[in-house]
Amino acid sequence: MYPFLFKGDLTIVKQQNTLTKLKNFAGNLKQNLFVLYLSYKDDRVPWYAKVFAICVVAYAFSPIDLIPDFIPVLGYLDDLIIVPIGIFLALKLIPPHVIEEYRFRAEEIKKNGKPKNWYVGILFILIWAAFIIWIGNIIINLFQQP
């Protein structure tokens, strides 16, 4: 298959192929994000599907991740696992005829680029600020005790 590789190198190639397949799968699901963006506004979609789809779309379109990408391993967790699972579940909640109706329009929107959701981005900034303040208070209290 790969005549120029040694046995150990073949394992690395297989791991890269698996990672590439996972990234492609996540990318295909992300293409459906625009379908969710359009379909949550439709009256034929149940309210619980709308709420879930709004949460998934808002998080995916947020310019700031809840888990920043610079954190090793965990930083890419949302891009490779959390967002695709959210999209997959939201698509299961929406009637199939609504999804098919919005596929073409979603392709047009996708060509124009991903919209940004700064409201969710600000929410994530506030969450991180609260977390930093909380950790800071813990550290200060540890050093103030005799």
Image (cartoon, rainbow, N blue to C red):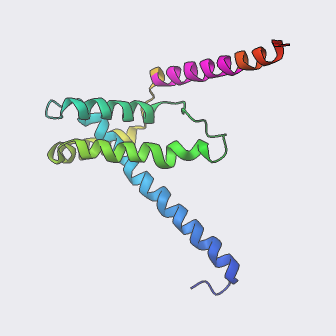
Residue drawn 21% across and 41% down?
94
Furthest-right residue in this view: 146
Judge by depth and name the residue closer to the eye, 107 or 88.
88
| 117 sits left or right of 130 in the view | left
Residue 3 percent location from the top left of the image: 64, 87
Q: Which of the two residues, 52 or 60, is positioned nearer the viewer here?
A: 52
The residue nearer to you, when weighing 53 against 30, is: 53
Residue that appears at 52% across and 66% down: 18
- Which residue is at 64% across, 71% downward? 12
Q: In this view, does 106 lie above or below 62?
A: below
Q: Locate the C terminus and report the quarter of the image it occupies.
A: top right
Residue visible at 45% across and 20% down?
119
Is residue 40 in view from this perspective?
no
Image position of 103 with respect to 7: above or below: above
Q: In this view, does 74 lie to the left or right of 26?
A: right
Quadrant where the N terminus lies?
A: bottom right
Magenta residues? 120-135
Judge whether 3 appears above or below 73 on screen.
below
Does residue 42 show up? yes
Along the horizontal axis of the image, is 143 left or right of 64? Answer: right
Residue farthest along the front direction in this orientation: 146
Q: Residue 136's spot in the image, x, y percent? A: 72, 18
Q: Magenta stretch: dominant SS?
A: helix
